Image (spheres, rainbow, N blue to C red):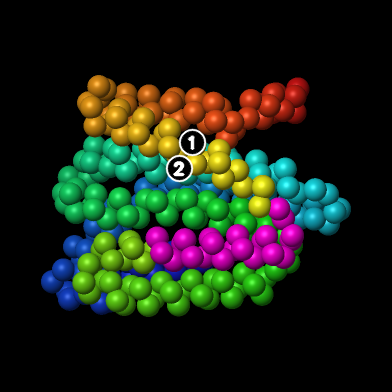
């Protein structure tokens, strides 16, 4: 997984002529850094989930509730992060970098949605690891490498850094989908564990709300990001993507 996560910038440097390779590699890296930082939040979930899944599978406990909860939480985080970052990409990149902001934004808008499939990978890949399906995981990872290299070879000469971003998003999406299919097939998990309707309603309400805040210039970007985060959390509870009972259960466990 690390191979196809990191190979894009190397391929940009190797495929493109020396006159533009350094520039395009830098543009890709500027967009990738924030993605790399944010997926650490999803990674922390996998650190918690691996021993939890292992114990529950060994003792033949019902893992469906924990799958549903972890999926809902990571979906909320990933979608909110993508919508917010895409909506405020220019202010964020302008704050972080002094040059090539427009070029970085064009790559950023393609690359940052990778948070969503990567987050799902940290759930379902971890579940397959806990269940001992290492052979299937390795096959999926190898498939991911092959897909990534092929798409990069085709798109980088034409689209440069944007081509590598498309390759990354395509690879992450395919790998995530394959892992989800394998989990449902191998562990006989019902599809009801994924709250499709709640996820859809959450997205339908969130995307236009953040778009309006970002493009009507009611707030400056910093205040807009905070307002968007509050709205996202409220919508998560309103749609019951994150049920109120989840907070109550956390409080009880804490006590």
Disc 2: which residue: 79
Please give the name of the residue rendered at 24% of the width and 37% of the height, measured from the top-left corner: 91
In this picture, is 16 found above or below 9?
A: below
Between 54 and 66, the one nearer to me in the picture: 66
In the displayed structure, does residue 149 sit left or right of residue 58? Answer: left
Please give the name of the residue rendered at 48% of the width and 71% of the height, measured from the top-left corner: 144
Which of the labelled discs sits on residue 202, or is there none?
1
Does the magenta segment cover residue 217?
A: no
Q: Quadrant of the C terminus?
A: top right
> Farthest left residue?
19
In the displayed structure, does residue 117 sit left or right of residue 188? Answer: left
Main SS, magenta region, reads helix
Please give the name of the residue rendered at 45% of the width and 39% of the height, measured from the top-left corner: 203
Does the magenta segment cover residue 185?
A: yes
Neighbor class of circle 1 (other Cα within 10 Å; few <14, some 14-19, many 20+) is many
Between 235 and 14, the one nearer to me in the picture: 235
**Residue 153's x, y, as percent?**
31, 77
**How far is the residue under mark 1 from the one under mark 2?**
9 Å
Q: Which residues are magenta?
A: 169-190
Please give the name of the residue rendered at 50% of the width and 48% of the height, measured from the top-left corner: 40
Which quarter of the picture shows residue 163? Answer: bottom left
Earlier-in-chain disc, 1 versus 2: 2
Assess whether mark 2 and mark 1 are in contact (beta carbons under 8 angstroms): yes
Q: Is residue 225 visible?
A: yes
Q: Secondary structure at mark 2?
A: helix
**Residue 200's x, y, as percent?**
49, 41
Which quarter of the picture shows residue 240? Answer: top right
**Residue 125's x, y, as percent?**
61, 60
In this picture, is 248 found above or below 160?
A: above
């Amino acid at each position: 997984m690390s191979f196809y996560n990191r190979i894009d910038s190397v391929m940009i440097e190797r495929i493109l002529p020396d006159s533009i390779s350094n520039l395009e590699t830098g543009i890709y890296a500027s967009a990738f850094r924030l993605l790399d930082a944010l997926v650490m939040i999803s990674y922390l979930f996998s650190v918690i989930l691996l021993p939890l899944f292992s114990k529950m599978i060994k003792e033949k406990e019902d893992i469906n509730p924990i799958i549903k909860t972890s999926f809902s939480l990571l979906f909320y985080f990933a979608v909110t992060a993508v919508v917010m970052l895409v909506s405020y990409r220019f202010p964020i990149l302008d704050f972080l970098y002094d040059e090539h902001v427009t070029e970085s934004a064009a790559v950023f808008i393609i690359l940052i949605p990778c948070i969503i499939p990567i987050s799902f990978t940290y759930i379902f890949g971890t579940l397959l690891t806990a269940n001992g399906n290492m052979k299937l995981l390795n096959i999926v990872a190898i498939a991911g490498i092959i897909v990534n290299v092929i798409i990069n070879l085709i798109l980088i000469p034409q689209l440069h850094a944007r081509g590598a971003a498309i390759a990354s998003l395509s690879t992450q999406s395919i790998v995530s989908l394959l892992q989800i299919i394998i989990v449902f097939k191998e562990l006989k998990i019902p599809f009801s564990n994924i709250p499709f309707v709640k996820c859809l309603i959450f997205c339908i309400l969130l995307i236009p709300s953040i778009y309006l805040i970002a493009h009507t210039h009611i707030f400056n970007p910093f205040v807009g990001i905070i307002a968007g985060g509050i709205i996202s959390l409220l919508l998560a509870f309103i749609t019951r993507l994150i049920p109120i009972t989840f907070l109550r259960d956390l409080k009880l466990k804490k006590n």
